[in-house]
């Protein structure tokens, strides 16, 4: 087929603006998939994705479309993950395209993610086709949406297509615009074969399957391929396209989107963003934009029941096979036993992995406080990277501490401005720029420490703005600040699960809160128990656990001996499970309660 008749594009949108519905409508219109199959909304295949309305894995699909000019075009629709945590994956999916359909919900207007995604598309030099979607809604405000397109995204309003994925309006217009406005495959003239890996999938039988976009040259079974980032060679076993199910074909040509199965079994060896070339006639330069993805957020994950350790380990291993950005290694904690230190791209990524462990692998887990990677400059100039408070060096040896920052775009209603600015201040952020979006909304650009948004920033943004606020962020530079490690001690013994790295100005309040919480949760003991928060051995907050024996039988007046025995047995059972810390018996769920309370 003539490669000039190929169009590679994606749909980008804020969550809930109708991407899945519209994609399905396109598949239906081009007879790629029948209506019946579509009821399952198959592009988002994981349950969790469906529930949360986010796309984690990119599933491309090839459609054939006869355009009004009478020619038949091959349209490769790439699905992109919507959330910022996966922005590197988004950027690689975009790099595989020449155009992007940018969806805007006609009733909601431009949101934080719309702006972030549009910028990503512009930075990949994609032709952006603006689509104002859900125009069937009575609350649709076309005038406002077109104004926002011009003012915020600098896209001429006359380029906008009006559509409704639900009632099928504008579907043909979108397909025609893709054919007419998106350029044919770029970079075809390069002398050697260059193929972008934009995603990969692990298959228990076939090993690692790379999702690819061929830019120049071609690839077929039995070729010896070369992965340029590692110089690793492998034999190609099979190539094919997505119809949307994987379908074997003889050869993938320049402009094609498809998959490559090779002799490589280990998914960590096929990296997203890498360039595949042919070993006998290798390309000189890789395709642009490759980078190693590095986890930014870390936490400890522990099985609630220690018997579940092996199950947790197996579950993490299986999740990692399909998610190279997720890393883990074993660790142990005095309070929580044996578990794993895990690294994630961001908060949402962390939540998704935790949720999948619970659901798909049926293990109840407890997570420690999330942490970012701090850089610590020691005397003599050595720079340590610390993602676990346990590894924080002795304060006497530290010259400087640095933490990662983010640049956030926050969209909010005007009347929440005061409260949001106060929240940003509380989180040690600085607001650098304010844009008026329309009569009711503003967009703020602020710089915040990543650490400060880890726990409750988004929840508080949503609650202050009654759900109308939205946020997106990109990672920024490291900045020096006064960071310290705070320990929590029970009768003088530090409890590692509660150690954390905090800004000095916040240590006392956080220490006090933790001590109070623990004092409340730890049951009364036979002797006085001190709970202290300390920085470098200096106590900054303290509380005491009550001193008393809890007589569980006192509730049973009357002589019901069997009931009394049952209670005593229960108490014995409870004791068995307790952890001993500094001679203090602590029920394991005490740690969990405190960790859960933030
Ligand atoms: P995604 O998160 O961007 O993939 O959005 P979905 O396609 O899952 O749609 C989000 C919600 O909007 C769902 O409840 C859809 O039924 C609804 N929706 C999608 N497209 C339209 C549309 O054109 N009109 C209306 N009224 N609702 C729509």
Image (spheres, helix red, strand yellow):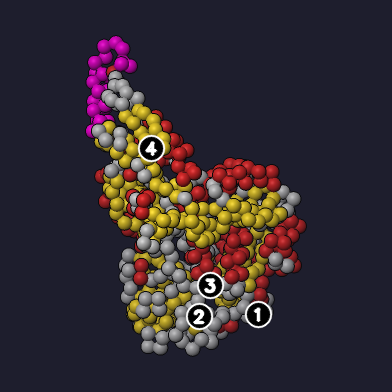
Badge nearest the viewer, 4 or 3? 4
Query: Which structural element holds mark 1?
Result: loop
Q: Which residue is mark 4?
A: 539
Labels 2 and 3 touching (C-beta < 8 A)? no
Is residue 230 visible in the rendered structure shown here? yes
- Rendering coords of residue 307 (x, y %): 26, 44
- The residue carrying mark 2 is 215
- The label nearer to you, 1 versus 3, is 3
State yes or no: discs 1 and 3 in contact (Cβ < 8 Å).
no
Position of 406 relative to 288 (above/below): above
The magenta region covers: 554-578
From this view, report whether residue 169 is shown above or below residue 580.
below
Closest to the observer, 304 or 26: 304
Under circle 4, the secondary element is strand
Q: Is mark 3 within 8 Å of ligand 1?
A: no
Mark sitting earlier along the chain (1/3): 1
Of circles 4 and 1, the one toward us is 4
Callout 3: SS: helix
**Residue 576 among those drawn in magenta:** yes
In the image, residue 111 above or below residue 195: above
Residue ID for mark 3: 95
Residue at point 36%, 51% (across, down): 396
CA distance separating discs 4 and 1: 79 Å
């Amino acid at each position: 087929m003539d490669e000039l008749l190929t169009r590679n594009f994606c749909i980008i949108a804020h969550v809930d603006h109708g991407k899945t519905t519209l994609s399905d409508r396109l598949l239906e219109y081009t007879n790629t998939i029948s209506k019946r199959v579509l009821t399952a909304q198959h592009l988002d295949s994981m349950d969790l994705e469906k529930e949360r309305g986010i796309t984690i894995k990119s599933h491309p699909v090839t459609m054939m479309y006869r355009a009004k000019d009478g020619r038949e075009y091959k349209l490769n629709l790439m699905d992109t993950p919507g959330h910022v945590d996966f922005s590197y994956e988004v950027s690689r999916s975009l790099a595989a395209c020449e155009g992007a359909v940018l969806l805007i919900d006609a009733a909601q207007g431009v949101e934080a993610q719309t702006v972030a995604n549009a910028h990503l598309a512009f930075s990949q030099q994609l032709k952006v086709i603006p689509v104002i979607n859900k125009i069937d809604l009575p609350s649709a405000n076309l005038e406002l949406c077109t104004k926002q397109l011009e003012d915020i995204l600098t896209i001429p309003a006359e380029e906008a297509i009006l559509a409704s994925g639900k009632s099928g309006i504008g579907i043909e217009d979108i397909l025609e615009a893709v054919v007419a406005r998106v350029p044919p495959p770029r970079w075809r003239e390069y002398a050697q074969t260059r193929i972008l890996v934009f995603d990969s999938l692990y298959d228990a039988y076939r090993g690692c399957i790379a999702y690819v976009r061929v830019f120049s040259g071609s690839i077929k079974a039995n070729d010896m391929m070369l992965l340029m980032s590692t110089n690793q060679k492998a034999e190609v076993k099979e190539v094919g396209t997505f119809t949307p199910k994987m379908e074997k074909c003889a050869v993938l040509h320049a402009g094609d989107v498809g998959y490559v199965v090779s002799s490589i079994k280990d998914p960590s060896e096929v990296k997203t963003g890498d360039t595949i070339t042919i070993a006998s006639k290798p390309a000189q330069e890789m395709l642009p934009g490759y980078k190693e993805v590095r986890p930014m957020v870390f936490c400890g994950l522990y099985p609630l029941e220690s018997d579940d350790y092996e199950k947790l380990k197996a579950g993490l291993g299986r999740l990692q096979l399909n998610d190279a950005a997720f890393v883990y290694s074993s660790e142990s904690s005095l309070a929580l036993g044996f578990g794993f230190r895990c690294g994630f791209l961001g908060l949402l990524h962390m939540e998704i992995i935790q949720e999948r462990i619970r659901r798909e692998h049926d293990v109840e887990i407890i997570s420690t406080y999330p942490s970012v990677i701090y850089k610590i400059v020691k005397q003599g100039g050595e720079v340590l990277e610390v993602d676990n408070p346990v590894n924080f060096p002795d304060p006497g040896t530290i010259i400087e501490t640095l933490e990662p920052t983010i640049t956030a775009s926050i969209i909010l209603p005007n009347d929440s401005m005061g409260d949001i600015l106060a929240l940003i201040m509380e989180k040690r952020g600085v607001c650098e720029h304010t844009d008026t979006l329309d009569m009711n909304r503003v967009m703020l650009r602020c710089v915040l420490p990543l650490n400060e948004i880890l726990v409750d920033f988004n929840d508080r943004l949503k609650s202050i703005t009654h759900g109308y606020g939205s946020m997106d962020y990109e990672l920024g530079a490291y900045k020096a600040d006064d960071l310290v490690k705070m320990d929590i001690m029970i009768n003088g013994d530090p409890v590692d699960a509660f150690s954390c790295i905090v800004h000095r100005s916040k240590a006392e309040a956080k220490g006090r809160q933790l001590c109070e919480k623990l004092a409340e949760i730890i049951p009364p003991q036979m002797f006085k128990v001190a709970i202290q928060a300390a920085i470098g051995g200096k106590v900054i907050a303290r509380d005491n656990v009550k001193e008393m024996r809890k007589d569980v039988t006192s509730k049973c007046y009357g002589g019901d001996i069997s009931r009394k025995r049952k209670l005593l047995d229960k108490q014995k059972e409870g004791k068995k499970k307790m952890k001993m810390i500094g001679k203090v018996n602590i029920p394991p769920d005490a740690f969990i309660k405190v960790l859960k309370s933030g």
